[in-house]
Image (cartoon, rainbow, N blue to C red):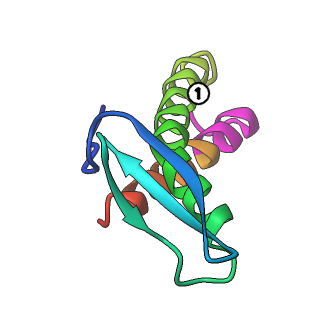
Amino acid sequence: MSNEKFTSGEWHAKVHGIGGLNIGIVYINGGGFDVSGAPDCVANAHLIASAPDMYREIQSVIIELQEVIEDYPIGCPDWVLLNSKIERKEKLLSEARGE
């Protein structure tokens, strides 16, 4: 199920104080990139660094929902609800992959 198109490895954010300003840096496998162009740069850096974990968590929820949905007849209200949740999460991951 994994169609990850982002860099594998460790992602983390650090805040660096430079000249009285806080700069958010996202480090991926030891290399880093600056996300300081926005007023909320520190929050953006942390959000970006947590993206792979969020992606994988959504993947695991999809798998769990797919297992649960098998217990319901196709088209019943519970099946429709679960299927809708699966489709929304699959769309979100597709967008994250740039598809």
- The residue to which callout 1 is attached is 65
| Rendered position, 52 above or below 73 | below
Foreground residue among 54 and 67: 54
**Magenta span of residues:** 74-83
Up the image or down, 32 lies above or below 9; here it is below
Residue at left offset 73%, top offset 34%: 78
Q: x, y percentage for residue 88?
A: 57, 54
State the image quarter where residue 18 is shown.
bottom right
Q: How many marks?
A: 1
Judge whether residue 9 is colored magenta.
Answer: no
Quadrant of the rendered image containing residue 42: bottom right
Out of 33 and 67, give the one closest to the viewer: 33
Q: Is residue 62 left or right of residue 93?
A: right
Q: In terms of secondary structure, what is the magenta stretch mainly?
A: helix
Reply yes or no: does residue 76 show up in magenta: yes
Instruction: Residue 17 in the image: state x and y as whole percent.
Output: 63, 64
Q: Quadrant of the N terminus?
A: top left
28 is higher (above) or lower (below) than 95: above
Query: Which residue: 28% across, 43% down?
Result: 4
- Residue at 55%, 45% in the rendered image: 50
